[in-house]
Amino acid sequence: MLDATYWWHLLCAIAGLNLIAWTASTAWLHRNRPDGTTWPHQRLQLLLSALYVLGCGYRSLLPVFDVPRLVMVDSWASSVLVGRTVATIAELSFAAQWALLLRGAALATGHRFSLRVAGAVLPLIAIAEVNSWYAVLTTRNIGHVVEETLWGTVALLSVLALLSMWPHATRAARRWLGLAIVAGAIYAAYMFAVDVPMYWARWLADEAAGRAYPSLVAGVADASSRWTVSHDWAHWRSEVVWMTLYFSVAVWISIGLAHVRLPLRVQQPRP
């Protein structure tokens, strides 16, 4: 039997490096604080990034495979209910970072479409989180299908918004704008090519097997009190890629967003 412990140790090491990276990034920004126009935006990005870094660190130390209730550590802190709560806070913080990025860029370039997309990011991700909770509590993977579809849709809308601002961006701004477009496109492609089909296949398999699903109330009790400790690679294999990228690359992007200098003040939008 292959052991997933080494992968778990890798996640723990990455979590430690992420915390060091966030601390170093914050110290650097405070030493090289920009002018008052962009610092409020960057300071807010740092605070949101801290929530994401800590949330991902927690989930790296105490990994949870939500629907089958699999954990690495036998503790109430590993319960699905606690893990999903931490994940919700972290994911909403990350979504808020992207909303701030789009909003700041829209204010800097004066584009209404991008401003509207920025305003839609958090509501759409909040709906995604509701579907995630539905999936986790009832073990119905169809909730994850909707959740991941919404995340992918937000990524696509963000890419379109960033592309619309490209002609009006300065040469310096185009460097981070290009990185954001590439990152968003890769993320959207992964969601629609890998994640959504994976959860859809799980949903179809459960339906074909005639799986019985708990109610929401029963699901809360189950998610807070039942977990199975497993270090078997076969149990975790399907989660390895997305969790590793989620707890590493996504965190680095979160930290990096604080270095983008954008305004928080409102400018007159361009039609």
Image (cartoon, rainbow, N blue to C red):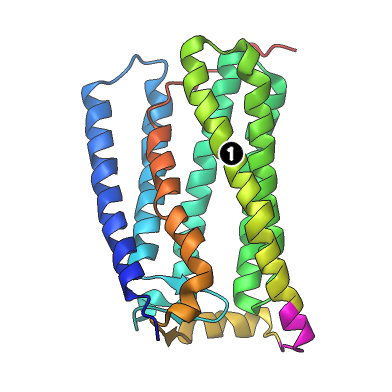
Looking at the image, which residue is at 28% across and 35% down? 25
Q: Position of residue 18 (x, y in %)?
A: 30, 49
* Residue 210 inside the magenta-drawn segment: yes
Dot 1, how many residues are within 10 Å of its Cα: few (below 14), some (14-19), or many (20+)?
Answer: many
Residue 228 lies, with reference to residue 199, above or below; the image says: below
* Residue 193 inside the magenta-drawn segment: no
Residue 74 visible in the snapshot: yes
Q: Quadrant of residue 217?
A: bottom right
Q: Is residue 186 left or right of residue 210?
A: left
- Per the rendered image, the range of residues in magenta is 205-212
Q: Is residue 81 left or right of residue 33?
A: right
Amino acid type, label 1: Gly
Q: Residue furthest front?
A: 1
Q: Quadrant of residue 109?
A: top right
Looking at the image, which residue is at 27% across and 35% down? 26
Q: Quadrant of residue 55?
A: bottom left
Disc 1 marks which residue? 184
Q: Position of residue 262 (x, y in %)?
A: 47, 21
Q: Position of residue 121 (x, y in %)?
A: 63, 41
Q: Position of residue 11 (x, y in %)?
A: 34, 62
Q: Dividing the image into 4 quarters, which one contains the C terminus?
A: top right
